[in-house]
Amino acid sequence: MAAAVLLAACSGGPEDGNEGVTDPAAAVAASGPTNTADVVAALEGGSGARPDTAADAGGGSGGPLELGPIDPLDIPGEIISEYSLVEGDCFNRFEGLQAGRRLAITARTGCDEPHWGEVYHTFDLDAPDPAIYPGDDAVRGFALRVCYEQFEAFVGEIYELSVYDIGVFTPNRTNFEHEVARYRGVHCWLYDPSDDSVSGSAEDTAR
């Protein structure tokens, strides 16, 4: 099998992304209220926006990525866009090099099979058009707050007591503002930072 490693961090949007580490509990403390009016106001503000090339979605162990050749034919499961995942899907995430370029691959697999992450909640950023992208940090911070609040209902215990960590897939500026191919979906997913591969769903495991 071609050399590949599971991603230690998720991508920032369907078109680009990089690694980032954010404590969901800290994001909750810093992000303020989550009512719709506040969310819309934040998303319309547009302050602190960074270029698309700096898109960042948070999550992951933060360890160094070891890139190597990767062959999609060697990857088990159904290769799909991470934004095609739905609640309850389990997946593996691989990153490697192909023809000298970075290649990230998401493969959906059964939760009873070895996997790295599991999607436990999805939602759309609520903002009227034409809303200005408020910046990667603002989008990621809000996404982590919502994902943090939904964590206990899925796992059965609060984030601080759980063995799992939280990751998010979020749209970047291009996806958020595009007039035709607009995408504002957020995926909340969890993973075990102490283990690259687990079997079985995390749903209700702490109840």
Image: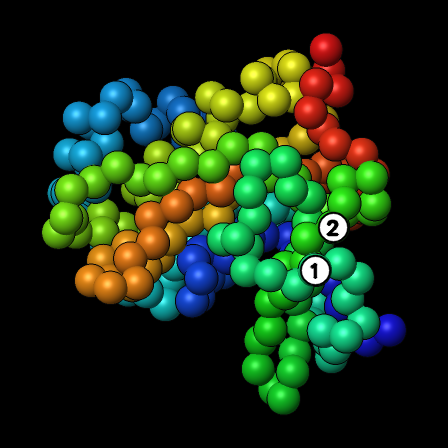
Q: Residue visible at 44% across and 56% down? A: 12
Q: Residue visible at 22% across and 52% down? A: 133
Q: Residue visible at 75% across and 58% down? A: 77
Q: Nearer the viewer, residue 48 or 111?
A: 111
Q: How is the image coloured?
A: rainbow
Tag 1's secondary structure? strand
State how far apart marks 2 and 1 are (Cα): 7 Å
Quick one: which residue is furthest to the right in this view? Answer: 1
Residue 52 on image: x %, y %: 32, 65
Q: Which mark is residue 78?
A: 1
Residue 122 on image: x %, y %: 47, 37
Camera sees residue 141: no
Q: Which mark is residue 37?
A: none
Q: Which residue is mark 2?
A: 109
Quick one: which residue is furthest to the bottom in this view? Answer: 99
Tag 2's secondary structure? strand
The reply to whether discs 2 and 1 touch (Cβ–Cβ < 8 Å) is yes
Residue 88 on image: x %, y %: 63, 36
The quarter of the picture where residue 167 lies is top right
